[in-house]
Image (spheres, helix red, strand yellow):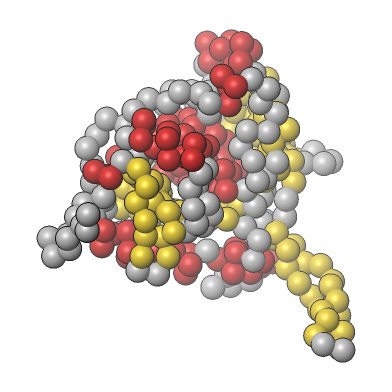
Amino acid sequence: MMSSPASHAGCRPVVARRHDGDFARPVDEWIAVEMPIALMFAGRSFAVMLATPADLEDFARGFAVTEGVVETIDEIGAIELRREARGIEVRIEVPESRALALDARRRSLAGRSGCGLCGVDRFSEALRPVARVATETRVPPAALRRAIADFSGHQTLNEAVGAVHAAAFCDLDGRILVVREDVGRHNALDKTIGAVLAGGLDTTNGFVLMSSRCSYELVHKTAAAGIVLVAAVSAPTSLAVELAEKAHVGLVGFAREQRFTLYASASRVGIETDIAVAS
């Protein structure tokens, strides 16, 4: 459990009124913080996302890699956070060649916390290609079940406020190594990927577990980071399934309790010797 919500930048208290039948009483409640986060690369404004103002360095690193601003985390220099009146500026140093490339494709999008494509005005930008994940790593079913069973215990911010998504990176034994939370599922995944890359973990020897549905953007970000599988507690979309097949990324939905459904790139999940696959 979170020791004290007051110590977490992702939540703040409000006074609310709780109704229970014919009775009402004032209560102190903790709510998730959501604010504009401006991502600036080499002094150029690239995106403004509504996000939870925690783990923003991880967010910057993960976003830069999964959105193709840089190819590797080694291209990212200093990261500076500047609090402004209405939000936070995150200034990220990248090579000038990357900055010039941004000028050609800069979206200057105003992203909503629930949408990873807000502000994109061309089909080619919305459905950007991503490299196929070349490794043949397989995730054992037992590892998926272990991570699924442990996942809720790592969602400390959501336990306090009940309004945020979580993304976890798990190893091939099902141990949860990194968890990040945010009001936006895409933001949570970027934060987790940023932390994984900054920590020097091997992205090809693990998988992602999400507390949300699985959309195209989540598969795209998973593939861009070189991660072999993404599992979600809810269902995938059609574009997510199609991209997962193309990118050779395992796609698991309805990952709850001891069950899960494999939708794409079936070779990414091993078959236990005592289990037969019904035709």
Q: Residue furthest front?
A: 279
* Most foreground residue, 145 or 122: 122
* Most foreground residue, 68 or 177: 68
Above or below, comparing residue 122 to residue 17 in the picture: above
Q: x, y percentage for residue 38?
A: 70, 33
Q: x, y percentage for residue 170?
A: 35, 53
| Residue sitting at x 37%, y 56% | 261
Q: x, y percentage for residue 203?
A: 34, 40
Res. 71 visible in picture:
yes
Q: x, y percentage for residue 201?
A: 34, 43
Q: In the figure, is residue 115 to the left or right of 167?
A: right
| Residue sitting at x 24%, y 34% | 135
Classify the position of the C terminus by image quarter: bottom left
Which quarter of the figure has residue 246?
top left
* Most foreground residue, 2 or 119: 119
| Residue sitting at x 62%, y 48% | 184
| Residue sitting at x 61%, y 37% | 116
Which quarter of the figure has residue 136?
top left
